[in-house]
Image (cartoon, rainbow, N blue to C red):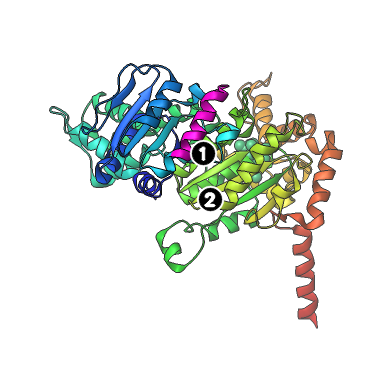
Amino acid sequence: MDFQKEIEIYFRSRFTLIVVVSFEEERIVEGIKQVCEQLNRQLLTWDHADFFQSVTKNIVAPSGIKDPLSALETIEKLEGDTVFILRDFHQCWHQQPKIIRKLRNLAQKLKFTKKTIVVTTPLSQLPEELKDDAVLLDFRPPDVKELDVILTRLISTPGVKVNLTTQGREKLLHAALGLSSNQAQRVFAKAIVSGGPLDDRKIDMVNAEKKQIIRESGALEFFAPSETMNDVGGLEVLKEWLRTREQAFGNEARDYGLPSPKGIALIGIPGTGKSLTAKTIAGLWRLPLIRLDVGALFGGLVGQSEENTRRALNLAETVSPCLLWIDEIEKGLSTGGGDGGTSLRVFGSILSWMQEKTKPVFVVATANNISHLPPELLRKGRFDEIFFLDLPTLQERKEIFEVHLRKRKRVVAEYDIDKLAKAAEGYVGAEIEQVIIDAMYLAFSDKENPGRDFSNSDVLEALKKQVPLSRSQSEAILALRSWLTEGRAQSASFNEKQQAQEQFVQIEISKN
Ligand code: ADP
């Protein structure tokens, strides 16, 4: 439901205290003004600097009411059907029991009038005492239609040259989703004034600006898809699962009656390609990828972590359909709840959001360490599937060698992949990549023949020099693997042993 409709319903049904959470005061006031005009109500604003100001023409603002308590008393006394917007009023009730009490009294008294108090604040934290009397409303950033209005206004300025295709315009607007109207306005304006007409080439610029703004805002980071499935060696079961759902967010899938996939968890040994997979899904499904750094959600002030979480999840919904990659989900919980329960509350809110979200946001949660994860996170039904990324099998190691040789523009046939893969037992993808880089250094700095190309034996030597994690941290890895065998997750790879067994059974059957 859009904001104006929602607020109109609240006005009509005599909700007397509404708290709207957003930085976008101007848009809130404009939206409420339109509702007031429709309902024939008067609209006044009050803040610490300008005191009472009238917004609609049908009322004269009382003058000289400087302190918040007198403002509330004035609201009580004023005649007429009026909406009062108190800007940034959270600053006034902070540790002010008198103000909170007065607001509560008013909220109850105004029920018999057509007066409503709307508080605007960028923080969603309400004083405990007000929770019962106030409704909390989230004010979302502009949607495509509203962004179109902003863009149209900007490009109708005389002298602005525009050469956008219909598709280009659409993409430009989508690129600005998630920004506040002020931010969108600034980004569009920058695209307009920077060299040449506003054309399809400026889409990348808007995307880059948004990336920057989102990064500055805290725990979120945008990724442009650059990896493809061909960059991932092995993990066939996982890849197949993803391919089957390639069209899952399209209109056709919706018309067919398919629910949007909720998300997957990728658990496993570090360096097995969890992050790599998250990035390739974005490429495969052609969706924007947002990375949420759970560690960065935690802020020092009371309530700040919850606030950051709420904002991050809201933003993901605004740019949906998208992928939300929750990186190293266990990180935030490593404090073991010794932070007064903040980390558990943050997790609680992520979990309930995952359960309740109606927007197509596909969650990819990655974790290296399951011992810190609350069991309810990995409960069946929370995710569509939980994949375990184990040490790569022989076939997978072959593929990983091939991927990284090709990446470095080497001819795969010139290497004995079979031998290398066998020698690399216990090495994960990231280690195999590192071994190839080490081998390149060995050859490049060869004393007798510097700069020669690296060979099989260089790779074998580099392998010997590197101790894989599976050896140096064998216990931790054993614990992780035994977790898999308890049947809590599906293996991301073909199980070669199982495959060999199946083949054996087939041979036996065909013999009989
Ligand atoms: P994780 O997130 O599981 O710790 P990453 O995805 O960050 O591991 O892996 C680091 C790098 O190692 C990747 O960017 C990639 O270059 C290489 N790598 C890991 N696994 C694979 C794989 N299965 N296929 C190809 N490369 C891999």
Q: Quadrant of the C terminus?
A: bottom right
Q: Is residue 89 above or below residue 64?
A: below
The image shows residue 179 at horizontal and vertical percentages of 39, 34
Residue under numbered circle 2: 357
Nearest to the eye among marks 1 and 2: give it: 2
Residue at the image position 80 percent from the left and 76 percent from the top: 508
Q: Main secondary structure of the magenta part?
A: helix
Residue 85 percent coordinates (x, y) = 37, 31
Q: Residue furthest left?
A: 158
- Residue 35: quarter of image: top left
Residue 328 visible in rendering: no
Q: Nearer the viewer, residue 31 or 424?
A: 31
Q: Which range of residues does the magenta coloring cover?
A: 94-109
| Residue at x 66% of width, y 20% of height | 445
Query: In the image, what residue type sits under mark 2?
Result: Lys
Q: Residue at x 43, y 32 (%)?
A: 119
Q: Which residue is mark 1?
A: 290
Amino acid bearing label 1? Ile
